[in-house]
Amino acid sequence: MQRERMSKKKSSQVHCISSHDHILIMASTSKHIPEIRLYKVWKGNNRFFCGGRLIFGPDVNSVFLTSFLIGAPALTFCTRMLVWMRRGDPTFNFTVLTSAFILTLLVFTFLFLTSARDPGIIPRNKTSSVNLEDGSNSSLTQSREWVNNKTHHLKIPRTKDVFVNGYTIKVKFCETCLLYRPPRASHCSICNNCVQRFDHHCPWVGQCIAQRNYPYFICFISTSTLLCIYIFVFSWINLTRQPGRLWSTMSHDMVSVILIIYSFVSIWFVGGLTIFHVYLMSTNQTTYENFRSRYDKKENPYKRGLVKNVKEVLFAKIPPSQLDLRAMVPEEEDDGSEYESEYGSSIRYDNEMGGKVVTKRESPKKLPSPTRNLDNIDISNEYETARDGASSELDPSFFSSQLDLPKY
């Protein structure tokens, strides 16, 4: 009897321990999907810094060139004024030096705000369907066969009409971002993003110029023009204030001569760019629209008068960004623009950039998830090859079992 009681007690203890261990094992073996910051899996060509807080274009290195072209003459001029403070009127030279420093600081501030912020990128469509019309229940599965025009019966209109200020505007469907672009939006082929109120992609700031950074771009080129004029004028004043003949003074002060020539050439470039964008701002046009002569033969639906046009660009509230680049997303999540093949390569689709671009990526060889396959892999040609060719190694049953394709 005593042995039976002891055995029952031990068995009950073992049962409790095994039950607890079973719970721990279940918790430890439960599937945990790792999460990653959104900017690390971003499908555009942008470059990110400070943990996704700063967003630049793919040509961010050009910002350093622009900074050198602005900072080198500005620093030279300020150094020259420091030398002249000991020789001439210190009050005059100090005032000129301080003004030049403040103007240079403004130029670099507006350059940073233009190139390091979201210009107005429209997030790519990640839903499973695209509405044909606003308010319509009809939809189309985002099959990559349709995007690549492999399935002709799965098509939606490439354009649709929307009304803006009483005018009919045609908006296009972006086959890369899988969405109808809002009015005045366009897909930047350099950054590979759809951007709100796209103006142009500026190589000097390495970023798209669009809705959210266009006011800062206007301020950047305007202050750059003022800085060039400022250096040009006061370099001449420094020459004329020196005793002796002008040509003799110029031969002894080559720094001022170089600054005069450099700033004179720069004025024509940044000054002309400033005048052009002031014209665009006053007529409520974008560079993209102007170069395409969009409003030469028809009325501009966005034109509201000089004062309201300027107010809309410079003094209107900048809309918040549609991106949360620091948001945590599942690491396996993919919006359908690329997939991992069985050879370990990554194939990226971009119809507007000229089809698909193959890029190398070191990753484990694994089959994609059903959602990725449904969006990305075109198996129609492979299936036909397996069906028609007796020597083919492709088996249609393999695809049906692995992909779980829907039946139409």
Image (tube, rainbow, N blue to C red):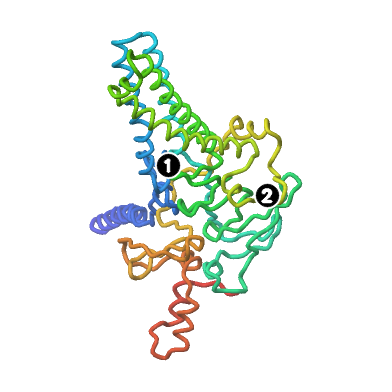
Q: Is residue 193 visible?
A: yes
The residue tagged 1 is: 204
Kind of residue indicated by mark 1:
Trp
Kind of residue indicated by mark 2:
Asp
Disc number lying in front (2 or 1) = 2
How many neighbours does mark 1 have within 10 angstroms: few (below 14), some (14-19), or many (20 or more)? some
Per the image, label 2 sits on a secondary structure element best described as loop
Q: Position of residue 104 (x, y in %)?
A: 41, 26
Question: From mark 2 to mark 1, how far is it between C-alphas?
Answer: 29 Å
Q: Residue at x 45, y 84 (%)?
A: 385
Q: Position of residue 282 (x, y in %)?
A: 64, 35
Q: Residue at x 62, y 57 (%)?
A: 172
Q: Quadrant of the N terminus?
A: bottom left
Q: Residue furthest right?
A: 166
Q: Position of residue 91 (x, y in %)?
A: 38, 8
Position of 117 compared to 289: left or right? left
Q: Nearer the viewer, residue 239 or 372?
A: 239
Q: Position of residue 248 (x, y in %)?
A: 30, 21
The image quarter containing residue 280 is: top right
Q: Which mark is residue 296?
A: 2
Between disc 2 and disc 1, whose residue precedes?
Answer: 1
As displayed, is residue 215 above or below residue 171?
Answer: above
Q: Is residue 101 visible?
A: no
As displayed, is residue 17 above or below residue 63?
Answer: below
Q: Nearer the viewer, residue 30 or 383?
A: 383
Q: Quadrant of the C terminus?
A: bottom right
Q: Which mark is residue 269?
A: none
Q: Residue at x 37, y 18 (%)?
A: 238
